Image: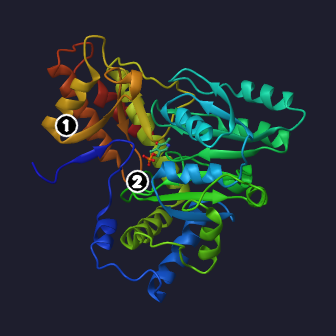
Amino acid sequence: MDDKLMLMIPGPTPVPEQALLAMAKHPIGHRSGDFSKIMAEVTENLKWLHQTQNDVLVLTASGTGAMEAGMINFLSRGDRVLCGSNGKFGERWAEVAKAYGLEVDVISAEWGTPLDTEKFREKLEADTKKEIRAVILTHSETSTGVLNDLETINRYVKAHGEALIMVDAVTSLGAVNIPIDEWGLDVVASGSQKAYMIPPGLGFVSVSAKAWEAYKTSDLPRYYLDLGPYRKSAAKDTTPFTPPVNLFFALQATLRMMKAEGLEQIFERHQRLTKISRAAMKGLNLPLLAPDDATSTAVTAVRPPEAVDAEKVRSVVKKQFDIALAGGQDHLKGKIFRIGHLGFVSDRDILTAISAIEVALRELGYEGFTPGAGMAAATRVLAES
Ligand SMILES: *Cc1c(COP(=O)(O)O)cnc(C)c1O
């Protein structure tokens, strides 16, 4: 059936009607007073969402563009950086760092396992010459559904004193608490198609005063992603280049929605959706990739039974129910499916997805669960919350 598609993937995420309608307008001039008003409101609300007084800059870019900008504005050729890598996105940041000629030291963990915070402590404590210029890591590793212990790693970075901390918060910002000012996070990047509840196209990066100090001496090549002009323009409620003005209309609408819901409530909802998904999948006797104490609140990665190809589960769920689930990336392709519960997702949506998965598993011949066991587990979580 047309128009019934339900996105249960960790980006792009579902877009509320208020945002869709906001976009369905003629564009306005980006140098107009009307646009400046929107820019002013959006900038203020972004600071609220980021729990920071730092600059939060908006780029016309995907999340990767925001993260790349966050990395290349505050480092210099040959700088030594520590990159955490336990999934697709962690790997990406090490690649970006290498592409810019940085000296990259990778701390890796198996996909599905959180980064070992002790390894960061050891490397940072051993660096008595203070050569490490930045620690770069992914908070919520979307490829596996693992949440890395950013708070602890950041504490070691603070004890080091010199290194900046640069965080991919693309599927954590707006889904789990990440108090930028309280923790003193220097660079935090995110993207519009995730918790922001609007289509892809905007990237966000928050920048601390300490990072701006490093900007003064940073010599990596950049032009479109040079954050200096974005900062100057933002101070005048404008942007250096033509922004996707209609996406700003949508962003204005969803930030208002987020404020009305409240930060705590947003985090609680994501927590609840995560608990429901995990309990339901356990009820179906399916193993989860991420351990209970390190789970992303944006996505749940599930291993289907041995005999069932994860891509088949996705295909039945899509064909029969118009629900899009995400697959595994790289070596996990066919080995896992991922349930996205990020952004504009309600209890109703997750219950629907769970039922669909149950039906699909039955149809694919898996009988390792009592019919309704997934929903029963989900119901118990809901009753307790
Ligand atoms: C979605 C995502 C990104 C950004 O990907 P883009 O395709 O560039 O928007 C980065 N990091 C994580 C953890 C993500 O989930």
Rendered image: mark on residue 193: 2
Rendered image: mark on residue 151: none
At x 72%, y 58%, the residue is 208
Left or right of 382, for residue 154: right
| Nearer the observer, 44 or 384 | 44
Left or right of 139, for residue 278: left
Under mark 2, the amino acid is Gln
Residue positioned most to the right: 128
Query: In the figure, 247 relative to 376: above or below?
Result: below
At x 84%, y 39%, the residue is 160
Under mark 1, the amino acid is Lys
Left or right of 382, for residue 101: right
**Labels 1, 2: front one:** 2
At x 34%, y 66%, the residue is 19
Query: In the figure, 309 relative to 317: above or below?
Result: above
Picture quadrant of residue 315:
top left
Q: Which SS class for mark 1? A: helix
| Nearer the observer, 226 or 375 | 226
Q: Give coordinates of residue 267: x percent, y percent.
A: 52, 49
Mark 1 crowdedness (10 Å alpha carbons): few <14, some 14-19, many ≥20: some
- State whether label 2 is within 8 Å of ligand 1: yes
User: Residue tagged by mark 1?
Assistant: 318
Q: Give coordinates of residue 284: x percent, y percent.
A: 31, 21
The residues bearing labels 1 and 2 have C-alpha atoms spaced at a distance of 20 Å
Mark 2 crowdedness (10 Å alpha carbons): few <14, some 14-19, many ≥20: many
> In which quadrant will I find the C terminus?
top left
- State whether label 1 is within 8 Å of ligand 1: no
Q: Which SS class for mark 2? A: loop
At x 35%, y 17%, the residue is 285
Left or right of 367, for residue 49: right
